[in-house]
Every structure is written in structure tokens, then in C-alpha cells.
Amino acid sequence: MSFTAAILGRPNVGKSTLFNRLVGRKIALVDDQPGVTRDRREGDAKIGDLKFTLFDTAGLDEARRDTLEARMSAQAETAVNDADVVLFVIDARAGVTPIDREFAERIRKRGKPVLLIANKAEASAADAGVMEAFSLGFGDPIAISAEHGEGLDQLYDALLPYAEAQSKDDEETDAERAVGPLRLAIIGQPNAGKSTLVNAMLGEERMLTGPEAGITRDAISSDFEWQGEKIKLWDTAGIRRKAKVTGKIEKLAVSDALRAIRFADCIVVLIDASMPIESQDLTLCNLVAQEGRAIVLALSKWDIVEDKQKTLKQVESDLEDVLPEIRGVPVVTLSAKQERGIDKMMNAVFAAVARWNSRIPTSQLNRWLEGTLERNPPPAPGGRRIKIRYMTQPNARPPTFAIFGNQLSKMPMSYQRYLMNGLRETFDLKGIPIRFSLRGGKNPFDREK
């Protein structure tokens, strides 16, 4: 199956030139005069073996109603709604303009995946504009020259996941994921009570349950609503330690469970609270953290736990000791058999997903960074102090922060954890993975000072 992409951006950044380059023909009119493109233009685009449908648009211009410009903008809106991914184009030679920032906010509100294209990057004079593009918050800019066909290999790599997602009938695109139901997977060791929990959530005996471990083999998805919120729920096979997974069927079942983790937004790691916590339970929590998903830890069979306070404290202590990188994971208790604690678990799930989707304004982030560096400056390996100049958040899901400065490759993990813990406490990012991207180069806002 093919996917669709829409080119957006302010006038005269090279949108139509890029469209012509990708469809292989000069279909769209190209001129230095802005506003040449009016209608939404559609073409069959190709980069190597990657084929997709491409829309060229007039951009999202502010205009009065019942004007030509307003109708042009409406066509662009339609293209965005129909597209699986947006190619947001800026002029790297001109840098990021106020109009680019305005367009970025309008595009972000559409909830679609965005690839940031820094066009006209063939000259060294465009390097500063490419660096400045990080401040728009759409991740790494893809530097290209649509006129000369440079940088298309990077664009190919960025678009490839959308083609792979469309090639499987049971997988949705990132665009659908962003606006569709919350994806929730329940994982745990065999016989932790996952299927019993899912049945209690669905209000029906959808999944086979019993005292035997390993009844569930496939990762089964079900659609349901909780307090008006749509959810796609996965019940998965129990995941034992790798050394104990021997049979072919169990290996396939575990593989299916791991696949569900990769496609979920939030994972509930279910632990049998009637048994001592095992290293495999913590390994599953770490697996979720490594995949960058929101996580909630649920202690099942709470109705038969004798010393509840001691058990809860032991679990929380083990998490702090073994998994400091996801400090503050919410821990809830429940009894699926008695249908107790499910609302509490779901509240924790939605709170975790909200934090997982968090975006921190660049201005707030750098005010925090300034105070943090004053309290505890970075170390000076080899006598040269590491210098952190600037920080921005290019991505959420999970929150990912780009740090700009000098000698960042020498920054010890202890100092990175110091920064991570500060971010968690200040911006309420407890219990979710945080990613750092360490980048050299100068502050992209230096020219504005």
C-alpha cells in the first residue's frame, strides 16, 4: 500500500520545486514570485524504490473568508487532513522566520507526523539556518537542495517507516496513532493475571483464563472505552526469562508480545503481588523503558496479599534501586477477580501518557537549564570544562531533549542523570523515559541576541 505526504511551508521556500523533483516531472509551476501555487496538486512521487502520493499546496496562509487566499488555505488544510505525513519546508539560507514559527504552531495542532525539510542547503551559508531549524521542535531537519537533488537519501530514510507501516494491514501509520485510540498493552510473567484483568476491563469473558500458566499465546487486541476515551487494548503472552523460553510456540508468543510493546503508547507491567518480586519483573520494566514507552506498574491479586504495606514498600524500593532511569514509575494495586483498582490503574495510565506526550517550551527549558548549571556546573575532564549552551525538545513520545555545547561526548552518565532527575522534578516527567541527544555547534539563537 502507498502512503500520502503533503508539502507545506511559507511562500517561496521551494515547495513546488521539491514536488517536481519527487514526481520526476515539472508539473507544478515554479517562480520566484510567492503564491504561484493555488490548488492542491497531486502526483505520484518516487525516491528510489519508495513510491507514495504527494500533495503540493499553497501553504497555510492567514486570509479573510471568501477570498482566493482563504480558499487556497482551505485546500492546504484538506491536503494535511488526507496526508499520513507532512513535509514542512523552510528556506535554510533565510533561516527560521517568524512566519515559519507561526506555520509550525499551526501544523503542530493538526496532530500529524512532521518531517522538517531545510531546503536550499547546497551552500555553506545555509549551515546556520539548518542548525536554527532545531528550534522549531520537529526533530532533526533534513537538509536538501530540491533544485539540485541533494539530500534525497536522507529524505528516503525518513519516509521509509511510513511505507513499511502501510504495507501491513494490521498496522496503522503514526498519523493515525497520534489521533486514534490510546494503545495500551498488558504484559507480565505467565500467570500474573493479565487475561483476568483484561476480561474485567472489557466486562466479558473475552480471554481464556485458568490456573495453568501460558494459556494466552497471541497478542490479542480489543477495542473498548473508559470514561468516554477510546482504547485499543492488548492482552499478551507471559514473558519468562529468555533461558526458560524453549518451545517454538512459546518463542512465537513472546515475539508477538514484544511486538505489541513496540506499537503501544503505554504498557501496564502486571506483577503477581502474592509472590515475591523477581528479577524478571524488573527486567520487563526495563524493557519498556528501553522501548521508550509510558509505563505503569500494577500489583495484581492484591486481595490475597497479607502484609500490603510491606509488599508495596518493597516493590517501590526495588524500582528505585534497579531502574533509576525511570524514577517515579506509578505503582497501583488491584484485584481483577474482584474488579477493584481498575479505575485507579486507568487514571495512572492516562496521567503517564500525558507526561509521555509532554512538550516543554524552549524558553522555560533554558531558564531551568541556566539555574541548574549554576547550582552544579558540568565537570572538567582533562582540565577543560564541558560547556552546555542551549537545550531544546525536538520530540515527545518519549520526551527527547537536544543539548548543544562543547565536549558533550565526555559528559559522564552521572551528570546526565543529574539533568534527567532535574527535568523530572521540575516539569513533572516522573516515571517515563527521557532521551538526550548531545550535539556540538553553537546556539541557534545566537544571531537573535
Image (cartoon, rainbow, N blue to C red):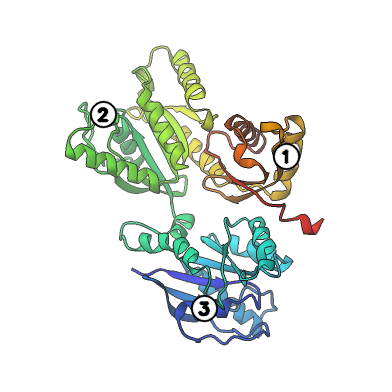
Q: CA distance from mark 3 to mark 2?
A: 52 Å
In the image, what residue occupies the spot 55% across and 77% down? 148
Residue type, label 1: Trp
In the image, what residue occupies the spot 58% across and 32% down? 413
224 displayed left or right of 7: left
Residue type, label 2: Ala
Front-most of residues 268 and 210: 268
Q: Is residue 368 visible?
A: yes
Query: Quick one: label 3 or label 2, which is nearer the N terminus?
Result: 3
- For disc 1, the marked residue is 368
Q: CA distance from mark 2 to mark 1?
A: 45 Å
Most extreme residue toward the front is 382
Front-most of residues 145 and 73: 145
Query: Quick one: label 1 or label 3, which is nearer the N terminus?
Result: 3
Q: CA distance from mark 1 to mark 3?
A: 41 Å
Q: Badge 3, how many Cα within 10 Å: few under 14, some, many 20+?
A: many
Q: Badge 2, how many Cα within 10 Å: few under 14, some, many 20+?
A: few
Query: Quick one: label 2 or label 1, which is nearer the N terminus?
Result: 2
Image position, residue 65 (x, y; %): 67, 79
In the image, what residue occupies the spot 62% across and 36% down? 411
- For disc 2, the marked residue is 243
Front-most of residues 380 and 228: 380
Tell me the element at label 1.
helix
In the image, what residue occupies the spot 44% across and 70% down? 4
- For disc 3, the marked residue is 19
Image position, residue 427 (x, y; %): 65, 39
In the depicted structure, whether residue 102 falls above or below residue 189: below
Quadrant where the N terminus is found in the figure: bottom left
